Image (cartoon, rainbow, N blue to C red):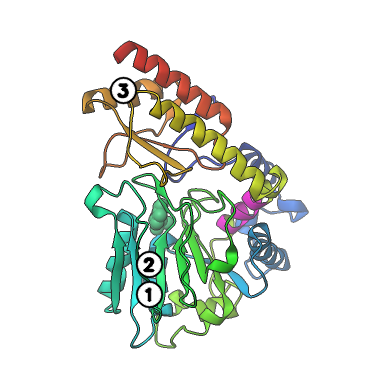
Amino acid sequence: MGQRIFNFSAGPATLPLAVLETIQGELLNYRDEGMSLIEMSHRSKTFDNLVNGAEQLIRDIMGFSDDYQTLFLQGGATGQFSALALNLAVDGKLAEYVDTGPWSAKAIAEAKKLGKPYRVIASSADSNHNHIPAEYAIGDDAAYVHITSNNTIVGTQFEDFPDTGNVPLIADMSSDFYCKRFDPNKFAMIYGGAQKNAGPSGLAICVIRKDLIERSPANIPTILSYKIFAGKNSLYNTPNTFGIYVVNLVMEWIRDQGGIDAVEKANRHKAGFLYTVLDSSDFFRPHAQDGSRSLMNVTWRLPNEELEKQFVAEALAEGLSGLKGHRSVGGIRASIYNAMPLAGVEALISFMKEFERKNG
Ligand SMILES: *Cc1c(COP(=O)(O)O)cnc(C)c1O
């Protein structure tokens, strides 16, 4: 086996080595079942225990009470853009969206396409989404407020979450799922695709307050119905069994790190380290404004595109992969999710300093 490199890809993304090793060790024979987990019936007692354990562990790690339920769904986060509009819209009420980047825009586009009444209450589009809007008014009779807690492409993140009173607050946390502590009681639902900070692709995790599940209308597609999936404990049809298994291992890994506070501390250290380098140079130009900077996706430009290409190519030659910015904004993006070790960030920073010395 060749050497593993530091993978800064935005998603699918690097996973904890300990988790990969557990998967490798259990692949042929899952806990003395004589078969791998991916060959096992989703109706088996063993899988049922796994799904129940994962449902609870995900809530426990962040302190979500029994008023909430974790759902494992398919179609990624994109599937939830339509599912949440179909399940949670309310006749005669507006759904409210905060537009902080391309993923917010996709969520909004889905509500629009489905003919749900909505309005965009704030947007940072004017400034190329380089900050999280601070001022916006939430209607006190909205169906829900939707935010994108971390903007994977542009590299911004909510530092504090809005207080929406009695209006259900929904957050797409795909790229900052469990990267820092937050108050679970502020949210009616959080959701995300697993493949950035929690596991493999093809799985959406939703933690939803149970009273909201009652909103699901009967006439929406079964595969998108929160009520049906909640009633069947995410096992209405065959779920992404492998995905749920890996997510559970990643959650156990968070617990073993010392829980969410320990993971947050490490994340703040890694990101702070990188932003300090960006701020102390005129060569590197960070995209996100102070106060809105992501702990997970750090974005910056170089003086010109030629240098950016050269940066990405030379970094790869040093074993630092996935640093090319998203095609819509360009530049460089380093995704430093929970599983990125400090050593990876240190290696990136020494590469950056050397690159600036030679080309600055
Ligand atoms: C990656 C991402 C998505 C899309 O996830 P899929 O699982 O590919 O549908 C949605 N929202 C955010 C914030 C993302 O980072």
Q: Which residue does the numbered mark 3 point to in the structure image?
A: 283
Q: Amino acid at mark 1?
A: Ala
Is residue 343 placed above or below 196 in the rendered structure? above
| Nearest to the observer: residue 43 or residue 328 | 328
Is residue 348 one of those drawn in magenta? no
Label 2 CB less than 8 angstroms from ligand 1: yes
- Magenta span of residues: 243-251
Left or right: 6, with 131 as reference point: right
Q: Amino acid at mark 3?
A: Phe
Is residue 150 placed above or below 145 in the rendered structure? above
Q: CA distance from mark 1 to mark 2?
A: 7 Å
Split into 4 quadrants, where in the image is the C terminus? top left
Q: Amino acid at mark 2?
A: Phe
Q: Which residue does the numbered mark 1 point to in the structure image?
A: 85
Split into 4 quadrants, where in the image is the N terminus? top right
Q: CA distance from mark 3 to mark 2?
A: 38 Å
Circles 3 and 2 in contact, beta carbons < 8 Å: no
Please say whether residue 324 is visible from this viewpoint: yes
Depth-wise, is mark 3 or mark 2 nearer the camera?
3
Q: Which residue does the numbered mark 2 point to in the structure image?
A: 81
* SS under mark 2: helix
Circles 1 and 2 in contact, beta carbons < 8 Å: yes
Which residue is found at the position 45% from the left and 63% from the top?
Answer: 162
| Nearest to the observer: residue 79 or residue 25 | 79
